Amino acid sequence: MNALIFEDEKLVALELIASLAEVDPAIKIVGTVGSVKGALRWFADNAEPDLIFADIQLSDGVSFTIFEKFQLACPVIFTTAYNEYAIKAFKVNSIDYLLKPVREDELRQAIAKARSLSQHRGKIAIDVQKLIEALSTPSARKPAYKEHFLGNTHNSWVPVNIADVAYFMRDELNFMVTKTSERYILDYDTLDQIESMLDPARFYRASRHCIVCIDAVQRVKGMANLKLQLILKAPNHQFGIDISRDKAPSFKKWLEQ
């Protein structure tokens, strides 16, 4: 399966390519373009790919412009941090919509769906139409994210509002730390489970061991090795969180959305 990538952040594109190689080595990346103009030139000189991975916000506009210029039949998997584009995204042959940072399990499911639909191309329009109708309902416009967690401390259960959480961390057990530095054990096996319940506009998976809330970030320091170091607001300012160089571009996009 040949795939084309629309992504204006080089390191984010490389991270996606690495994830694809891990998830499905049979996928061949035939090109990476970072602008609308670049994509239009690519389609003028090349045959349509089997699959497109598309960020919505490119360096010179939105990728929907590309689909208005070219009537493409191949499915599109959008990889972006912009929730508000979801409904329009599915109207242009999209088979999935993955929020950044893209999780490998969700990427694997999206690819499996693309392969399945490519064998039954006639069903794609019907499936997408049903998805558009589902996304158009009031309940779909605002995802139901977790509003509070039940923390364990000193043989007691304590309900904690999500607005009071600074970060989640893994240290043998999963912990929730509040903005006032209270620390609670959570009854979840993995951080992946916790991450799936959180609003991605407010919480970012900084590493395998930490999920941070945007409200808890005081500032971000650049480091010589192109990593980033998060300085949290007091009283959590002593807890250091590093962002790898590969994650730095997607983190910056999340921070400024």
Image (cartoon, rainbow, N blue to C red):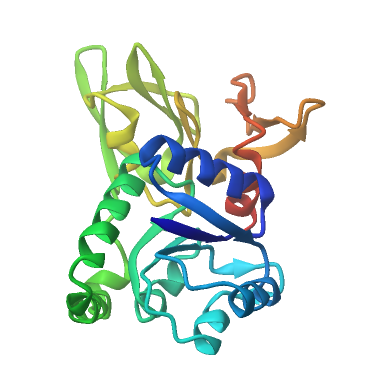
Residue at 56% x, 74% y: name it: 63
Q: Is residue 194 left or right of residue 256?
A: left
Q: Is residue 37 left or right of residue 216?
A: right
- How many numbered tags mark residues here? 0
Residue 33 sits in which quadrant?
Answer: bottom right
Q: Give the quarter of the figure containing the N terminus.
A: bottom left
In terms of depth relative to the viewer, which is nearer, 209 or 58? 58
User: Does 80 appear above or below 158?
Assistant: below
User: Does 76 appear above or below 247?
Assistant: below
User: Does 247 appear above or below 236?
Assistant: below
User: Does 229 appear above or below 73?
Assistant: above
Point out residue 12 in the picture as x, y percentages from the top left corner: 60, 47
Residue at 38% x, 44% y: name it: 26
Residue at 71% x, 74% y: name it: 60
Q: Is residue 135 left or right of residue 239?
A: left
Point out residue 153 in the picture as x, y percentages from the top left corner: 28, 17
In terms of depth relative to the viewer, which is nearer, 148 or 78? 78
Point out residue 55 in the picture as x, y percentages from the top left corner: 53, 63
Q: Give the quarter of the figure containing the C terminus.
A: bottom right
Residue 225 sits in which quadrant?
Answer: top right
Point out residue 123 in the picture as x, y percentages from the top left corner: 17, 76
Residue 168 sits in which quadrant?
Answer: top left
In terms of depth relative to the viewer, which is nearer, 116 or 100? 116
Residue at 55% x, 88% y: name it: 69
User: Please, which residue is most extreme toward the right here?
Assistant: 224
